[in-house]
Amino acid sequence: MKHALKTAVIGTLLGCSLANPAFAASKSSLSKAGLFSYNYAQISVVDLDYGYDGIKLDGSFDLNREMALIASYMTTDDDGHFDYDEFTLGAAYHTRLQSIPKSDLVLHGEFARASYDHRHFSTVHSHDDNGLRLGATLRYQAQSNIELFGDLSYESLFDNDMALTGGVNLSINPKFSVVGAIEMSDDDMLLLGLRMRLD
């Protein structure tokens, strides 16, 4: 998938939110629940450059005011020839940035396990690997119903990879939001998901 198409999808989501006040969550309801939530569950559809598409599940649960437990599971395939699955489990440290108003810095580290199967006629070749993912995320509340975020991460699975992710979180109401993101790495990914706050 070309970068222009991915950028257009995210731009369309942002434009719809800005133009349509029906998508705006009230400022008072968001302030009561906190500027950013680290208690949520999310389900997304994903599309990867090499022809893979599938589903991704994400979750986050606050352990205290600064630490959260995070986990994800992604399963994708390319119409039956290749299957790729990835599971992560780790922790995130989050803190308010005084130098940038309405923003949080999140430092995260996860254990990652991935596997892929290659089917050639009746033969299945399986490969798996364990590794680490380390990264930093900046979350910025642009408007009461719009969060912008960016993440820079390193993953040691298989051939090692750096990834740069940018996205937007559009609140439909205080409980639900739509998330769109582009991840640029060896295998670029487009993500579109629905997030439910658990706090």
Image (cartoon, rainbow, N blue to C red):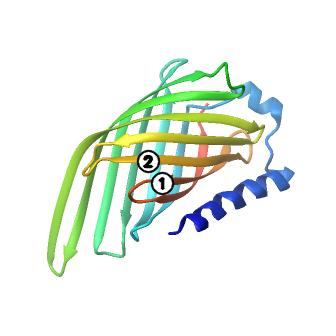
| Residue holding disc 2 | 163
Vertical side of 129 occupied by 152: above or below: above
Circles 2, 1 touching at the beta carbon (< 8 Å): yes
Label 2 secondary element: strand
Asked whether, in this view, residue 157 is left or right of residue 11, the answer is left
- Mark count: 2
Closer to us: 15 or 54: 15
| Nearer-N-terminus badge (2/1) | 2
Vertical side of 8 occupied by 38: above or below: above
Image location (x, y in percent) of residue 190 = 52, 59
Which amino acid, mark 1? Met
The residue carrying pointer 2 sits among few (fewer than 14), some (14 to 19) or many (20 or more) residues within 10 Å by Cα, namely some
At a point 73% along the width and 54% down the height, the residue shown is: 14
Vertical side of 72 occupied by 81: above or below: below
Q: Which mark is residue 22?
A: none
Asked whether, in this view, residue 163 is left or right of residue 138, the answer is left
Image location (x, y in percent) of residue 35 = 69, 29
Closer to us: 94 or 32: 94
Image location (x, y in percent) of residue 193 = 57, 54
Vertical side of 141 occupied by 21: above or below: below
The residue carrying pointer 1 sits among few (fewer than 14), some (14 to 19) or many (20 or more) residues within 10 Å by Cα, namely some
Asked whether, in this view, residue 58 is left or right of residue 87, the answer is right
At a point 84% along the width and 55% down the height, the residue shown is: 20
Label 1 secondary element: strand
Figure quadrant of the C terminus? top right
At a point 52% along the width and 47% down the height, the residue shown is: 165
Question: For the residues marked 2 and 1, what is the alpha-carbon distance in whole angstroms?
Answer: 6 Å
Which amino acid, mark 2? Ala
Image location (x, y in percent) of residue 48 = 44, 63
- In the rendered image, the residue lying farthest to the left is 123
| Residue holding disc 1 | 184
